[in-house]
Image (cartoon, coloured by chain):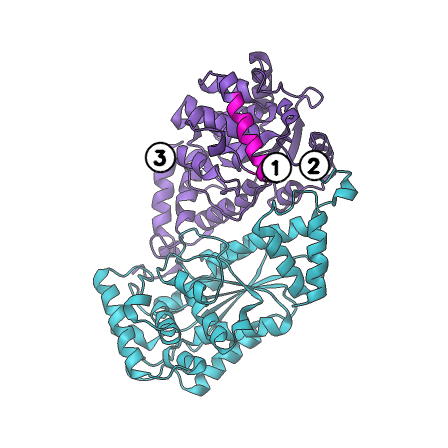
Chain colours: A purple, B cyan
Amino acid sequence: ANHSAAEAASERNGMLTKPPGALGRLEDLAIWYASWRGTPRPRVERPQVIVFAGNHGVTAQGVSAFPAEVTVQMVANFEAGGAAINQLSRLAGAEMSVHALDLDSPTQDFTQGPAMDGGACVAALATGWGAVDPSADLLVVGEMGIGNTTSAAAIAAALLGGTGADWAGRGTGVDDAGLRRKAEVIDAGLAKNPWRAPMDVLCSFGGREIAAMAGAIARARAEGIPVILDGFICSAAALVLHKCDPAALDHCVAGHLSEEGAHGAMLDAMEKSPLLSLGLRLGEGSGAAVAIHILKAAVACHSGMATFAEAGVSDG
Amino acid sequence: ANHSAAEAASERNGMLTKPPGALGRLEDLAIWYASWRGTPRPRVERPQVIVFAGNHGVTAQGVSAFPAEVTVQMVANFEAGGAAINQLSRLAGAEMSVHALDLDSPTQDFTQGPAMDGGACVAALATGWGAVDPSADLLVVGEMGIGNTTSAAAIAAALLGGTGADWAGRGTGVDDAGLRRKAEVIDAGLAKNPWRAPMDVLCSFGGREIAAMAGAIARARAEGIPVILDGFICSAAALVLHKCDPAALDHCVAGHLSEEGAHGAMLDAMEKSPLLSLGLRLGEGSGAAVAIHILKAAVACHSGMATFAEAGVSDG
């Protein structure tokens, strides 16, 4: 973040034709965005949405309401333009791309051992790193992967403590028995994979798409590209980075609070307050893509409004 | 609202490539919008934003942090394109217009008697009614009027009960003494204007811009145009209609929860749950204009997504 850009943006904010603070969180957002873009009067012109897809060996344990082949079917739907994230990316003026990570080779079932070895994890991180367009000025990363709320919950449990029951949610819509099953599967995975260093946790529970999201979020920081985090899965990816370095997510804002029950606790752990709370639990980057408009609104006001002096308005 | 369009939209929603309910509130919004537009697969193509401005005699009581001449100065700022609502309307692809209502003739100071006589109130309602473009497919009404949080709080107190202290807030930013003063002024107005029928309350406390907003909201219903309500002042206008007929706001959704403290109680009374909560307290229609994007996102998903059958995706 650029301190002088933040100061200049903050000064500009105080001169705009509105009562001080009247745009609430939009004011903070604009100043934060200005600091990461290194200019006091930024624009949002090239948002990028990347959807990563991966398959999960843990689906063998019956943790999802949908069969594993839906992952590849949905990738085809993304490529054909028929998914929610396609509509939301277009509406937000974002360039959207899809990266399917070795869908024919699911990760290992983490109840039997680590989901990924170090090589597979690094490859997925690198895919994410390489997927970011350095000329983008805003990034959303989303995902598709049947079984991945189970992976994300296991990551949260391993990094933040608690049991499967604390972190498991209904995902795409499991019933009460399915929810209990998910919690048991996570507990079994936690016992089988006792390592708790962030990168070890990522290897242990996967999946490839979660590692790719972490790689992309890290790359965005290196490029000075602000990130809007999506829901439960994306936050698990971000949490791995946060546990490596609490400042690693300073370039990120939480796009929304997911309906997946434990998402709020994950955001709390990262000290992120969500921009939206609309009961979404779809993934794909959908909540974050909706939140692009909130950031655009903040920046449009900040950079486009007249100052009191320009408009000849008495400033109270 | 059109029942068969709502049913057809609901059926379509169930076939889209997502787990049932995974788009949360966006699903309900799209179905609601479809019902008011009378088509199962609607589009949002012509949003309209109207800003009404009025002056308030009660400013003589020292209820605002800004001088009354700011109303006319801000109207000039709206016309020159320099205000927040200009940037937000442009971003949302909305046609924006400004109607200044007799700014040279402020309403009467309501601590001395009714702010408006019946003729003035009807004229303002008619201005609002006439300002709506019948070809619009979504409406936001906003306002500018130094002193109008005091009018809005008095309207709420008169229609919902309670005292000035229950409904007064900081508006553009009064200090603690100013807040106490506002509460006292409202109490004095409530005592001086004992009528509690909704239209009498509107005459009693004004202002012209609040009456105009009520007129526009009513016209939108007659034209089948859904409305996104803005914050504290807009909600006071809507509340007058709600007290005339609880169904009068079925075509309205609450765009946001204002930082003005008593706004939540007003929304509760109208049984409206806000789409956004970003700490805004600017008025002008700003919060509702940001919420246009939420509605557009809902409708884009609903009308643009592929069905399970179209995409060849297994539906669980």
- The chain identifier of the residue carrying mark 3 reads A
Specify the label residue A78 is tagged with: 2
State which mark lies toward you, 2 or 3. 2
Residue in view at x 51 percent, y 26 percent: A154
Report how far apart the C-alphas of labels 1 and 2 lie in the structure: 9 Å
| Label pair 1/3, CB-CB below 8 angstroms | no
| Amino acid at the residue labelled 2 | Phe
Q: What is the span of residues highlighted in magenta in the rendered image?
A: A170-189
Q: Earlier in the sequence, mark 1 or mark 2?
A: 2
Density class for disc 2 (Cα within 10 Å; few <14, some 14-19, many ≥20) is: many
Residue in view at x 59 percent, y 71 percent: B220
Q: Relative to residue A236, is residue B261 drawn left or right? A: left
Quarter of the image containing the C terminus of chain B? top right
User: Does B89 appear in magenta?
Assistant: no
Q: Tell me the residue that label 1 is attached to.
A: A284
| Amino acid at the residue labelled 1 | Glu
* Residue B251 versus residue A211 in the image, above or below: below
| Amino acid at the residue labelled 3 | Ser
Q: Tell me the residue that label 3 is attached to.
A: A4
Quarter of the image containing the N terminus of chain B? bottom right
| Image mark count | 3
* Residue A9 versus residue B221 in the image, above or below: above
Foreground: A5 or A116?
A: A116
What x and y, as percent, mark residue A288?
A: 54, 40
